[in-house]
Image (cartoon, helix red, strand yellow):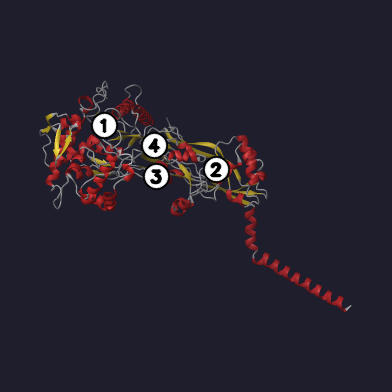
Amino acid sequence: MTRVRARLVVLQFLVVTLLVVLALRLWQVQVVRGPQFVVAATETRTRDVIVPAVRGPILDSSGRPLVRNRSALVVSVDRAELERMRDGGAAVLKRLGAVLGRPVKELRERIRPCGPRVTRPCWPGSLYSPIPIDDKVSTRQALQILERQEDFPGVLAEVQAVREYPLGTGASQTLGYLQPVTEEELKKRSKLKANFSGVDLVGRDGLEYVYDEELRGSPGLRRVQVDRMGKVLGIERQTSPVPGDILITHMDTGVQKAVDQALARAMKNAPKADGAAAVVLDVKTGGVIAIGSMPTYDPAVWAGGISEKEYQHLLSEKAGLPLISRATHGQYAPGSTFKITSVSAMVRDGYPLKGTYDCPGVYDVAGTAFHNFRGIGLGPMNLHTALVKSCDTIFYRAAYEMWKRDGGDTPVRRPKEPMTNTAKAYGFGTRTGIDLPGEVPGRIPGRAWKKEQWKATKDLSCHRAKTGYPEVAKQNPGRAAYLKRLANENCLEGFEWHAAEAANLSIGQGDVLVTPLQLAVAYAALVGDGKLRGPRIAKAIVSPDGTQVREVRAPVMGKLPVDKGTRGYIRNALSEVTSDGTAAGAFGGFPMDLVKIGGKTGTAEVYGKEDTSWFASFAPAGDPRFVVVVTVSQGGQGSMAAAPAAREIWEAIYGVKGKAALPGGRPPDRLPTIRRDGTVAQ
């Protein structure tokens, strides 16, 4: 009995202890942590749904869409929710693949995070936001997912705005594309983080990148009540999203199409051509009417994820690096189109503007024979004729004389360097400031540049002077010997600015590099009011209801170092190039009575390749409104590839063979009318 009584006492003690612990726990849950659990219980009955804003469209100057939105049913997957499942979401993906008609392997690839060793497709954005896996879903497929949410936890099917590009491959590098927001971007860009909806895409290039903040808008919030299965019972609170602003540009769809067609035809007609670019500028405003680059690509390839094959193609040199705009990133020797700066430099240095100069077939520069085109001498002439006929030896002589006055190989303390400094004053060697990302500055060589280059390459040059180029010698012994000799010269005297380099600069050869956009800006300043304007593609930002938010103007970046009389003299000379000069063949039969075209051809030599073809032009010649610059890499002579392409563009602008892209030869002087519902009034 004693043992039984002892056991009962122990049992009673345990029961009392458990009751005390239970009471304490109830007190803690209901009193101490009561409010916390009330909030938690409320949260389990509600869900916050971020409603992304509709991204603003990009329009041309007449209101025609360059980039617009289309409504699409998009299926997205919440990767974080799948990972919380026992099987890692395998069963859900299997069911989803059956509905969408996609292999499960493909779905897994699309939602895996991108990384150094991960091939496309993959997800480059935040892993805590829904990942779109299909933007071409049918209504039936979407309903299968929505009506059976218990079978598809973590899967969303909703209508979203998807970017569409009416021009196809036209101006793709200029317009840019969209990609998911990365964690790194959210950390670096505070404004982006403040308005990030979790499913937003951001601009990765072109106008989409530069004007991303204006185009993106602000997301809305919808708080819904749900049951334990996630089924929506009602809406508790809703804040509507604010659509992005509308970007109106100076661009014209008709001119842009003409540019793309002309460049494609120029490359087709030049068998070895590996790239081409064109720029059409408004001389009066600095607005970019059209800008094209070849090879190009369709920006729609980014929508819904890009495959590894497509991605590698865009990065391939064999494909011509289509992601890169040759208008703003392509750097080429400009050839004779550069002579506008050489004439200006001569006048600044005291050479008479209306003087007479001899144009021999060859000119001796410090012991080296520099030839005119094909070695043909043209006799005495003025600078007007030198530009029309594109004489080289006049400029060789002037550059050599300037070089000697600066002290030659032993320069004076403060050399004037008229050719180099005038070229820089024309904007060459610096970025134009266009509203596009990643523009390159080009290069204008001179004495200071030569010293900097020597310091940066001296060790390598001296090393190569000793070892030579055995890897080149196996295939080309002569080339290897030349490179070794050049390395030895650079090692010993690479800091010296030689006469031959000065002579080459005067005709746009040697180490000088410019972009097509830089040349267009320089010519616009020359034939316009003498002011260098930072070109602008954007014209205005307009709110979705049609209210103008702000006007975008091209800023004045500088002024040409030549007076109005000199500019007029050069412009008048260039006005005869298409009728009596080097471009006469390309413009034969063009109706100059309708509009007279002026311009300058350029043929730049490139070692081991065909010549770079250039044509810089303007119209009307008497009072220029537009500048058109075309370049074709490995296109041959300027009159053979670039000038015919420019002619096609001019014909489209003024309607020589059909309807004029710009009626009356003028761009619209008013913004298109945006109705309150966001549509454009025709």
Mark linked to residue 617: 1
Tell me what residue is drawn at x 26 percent, y 37 percent.
334
* Residue 644 can be seen, yes or no: yes
Q: Earlier in the sequence, mark 3 or mark 4?
A: 3
The reply to whether callout 3 and callout 2 are in contact (CB within 8 Å) is no
Mark-to-mark CA distance, 4 and 2: 30 Å
**Which SS class for mark 3?**
helix
- Residue 10 drawn above or below residue 52: below
Q: Circle 2 sits on which residue? A: 132
Q: Is label 4 in contact with label 2 (beta carbons under 8 Å)?
A: no
Q: Residues within 10 Å of mark 2 (few under 14, many from 20)?
A: many
The span from disc 3 to disc 1 (Cα, nearest Å) is: 29 Å
Please state which of the two labelled residues, at mark 1 or mark 4, is closer to the viewer: 4
Tell me if label 1 and label 4 are in contact, CB under 8 Å.
no
What residue is disc 3 on? 210
The answer to the question of whether label 2 and label 1 lie on touching residues, with beta carbons closer than 8 A, is no
Q: Which residue is mark 4?
A: 320
Q: What distance separates the C-alpha of mark 3 from that of mark 4?
A: 24 Å
Residue 210 horizontal side relative to residue 635, left or right:
right
**Extreme residue in the right direction:** 1
Q: Amino acid at mark 1?
A: Ser
Q: Furthest residue to the top? A: 589
Q: Nearer the viewer, residue 297 or 459?
A: 459
